[in-house]
Image (cartoon, rainbow, N blue to C red):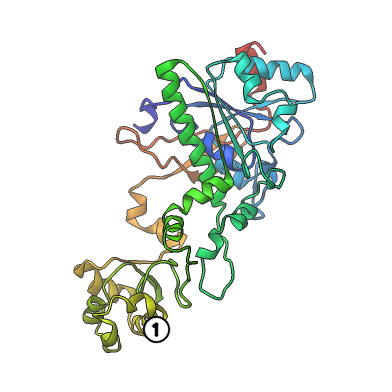
Amino acid sequence: MNNVVEMPLEGLLVVDMSQFLSGPYCSLRLQDLGARVIKVERPDGGDLSRRLYLSDTEIGGDSTIFHAINRGKQSLAIDMKNEADMAALRKLLARADVMIQNFRPGVIERLGLDYESVKAINPSIVYASISGYGEEGPWVKRPGQDLLAQARSGVMWLNGDEGQGPVPFGLAVGDMLAGAAICQGILAALVRKGISGKGSHVETSLLEALVDFQFEVLTTYLNDGRRMPKRSEFRSAHAYLSAPYGVYKAADAYIAIAMTPISRLQDLMDIGDLAPYRDDPSSWFGERDTIKRIIADKVATKSVDEWLSILEPADIWCARVLNWEELMAHDGFKVMDILQTVEREDNVSILTTSSPIRVNGARPHGNRAAPLVGEHSDLIRSEFGL
């Protein structure tokens, strides 16, 4: 039933000239919502992420990350040093609704495909640009790579325990957040286009997305005397939140406990040593590490299920910490139906995620794997007369 749902972006043509993660993540979301995405790649190797390996697994000659982020797209091979190919690309852009690019600043201008140039051939196009650090300033020419953007954003000082030094996220959060932000910009610009017929140029960067990601804690910092946050030295989970907020080791596994009055935990868990702190909320932050160590000692005496049977009926915010194997075996995950198998004619078959968005009660599923380099060049050239 999911495959027959009419998707909101059906009929939309997206020309994606980006590579690696941020731009392709954006076009993946648009594709999941029904847009046709034509991925423009170099004939000699294509998107560099085809060889960006997270493990030694290779499927059909490409990395798993390339397959994950480019499923369902079409590939058009364009040699950007060949004027005939560039003329064909400009002809395609004249028909496109959206163009996405994440070249380093200055490169797209040298190619003659900056916003003003593309607008001249397609005034109503929605043109999206992602960079590392914006279009001006001392970082413009620096590599717009996720770890480096995290390093410059301050976000690493929110992770881990105090004394650990800066701790990066174990995911390319800058890329994903920038891709999500530019996707929002594109959708807003498409609404404007639908109302006025006018196109737009929407822009973001990895650094801007990471700053926005921190809007809650940055606003506290900016309006609280600019005091630097201090992470807990023990079981830290949020630099600004008091005990018991954190993850604790039980007798058999781990349990997360969120915002909860210390007095309630003392009573429910029978922790006598919390008595000095139960009615003093200021101590829940000031004595955070001491309190968390007391709680940790008690949590270690029972299994996670035993603690959940005590805490959950009392409406304490807590949860078992799951690994991927446990997550995917759980009925709460299975009912979401968020995995799908995509395939290609050369016997490529990939089990991957599907869209996080449901439309009219249904989650869209596709069956098409990521393309080979230039796999759809003949089809696209014939269709658009390139």
- Above-or-below relation of 286 to 67: below
- Residue that mark 1 sits on: 290
Q: How many marks?
A: 1
Mark yes or no: residue 250 visible: no
Q: Is residue 264 left or right of residue 10?
A: left
Measured from the top left, where is residue 22 in percent x and y? 58, 42
In terms of image quadrants, where is residue 114? top right
- Above-or-below relation of 373 to 264: above
Mark yes or no: residue 174 visible: yes
In terms of image quadrants, where is residue 100? top right
Tell me the residue at 66%/46% (across/down). Answer: 144
The N terminus: image quadrant: top left
Tell me the residue at 65%/54% (across/down). Answer: 148
Q: Is residue 343 left or right of residue 377?
A: left
Disc 1 packing (10 Å; few <14; some 14–19; many ≥20): some
Measured from the top left, where is residue 90 in percent x and y? 67, 17
Front residue of 43 and 139 = 139
Mark 1 secondary-structure assignment? helix
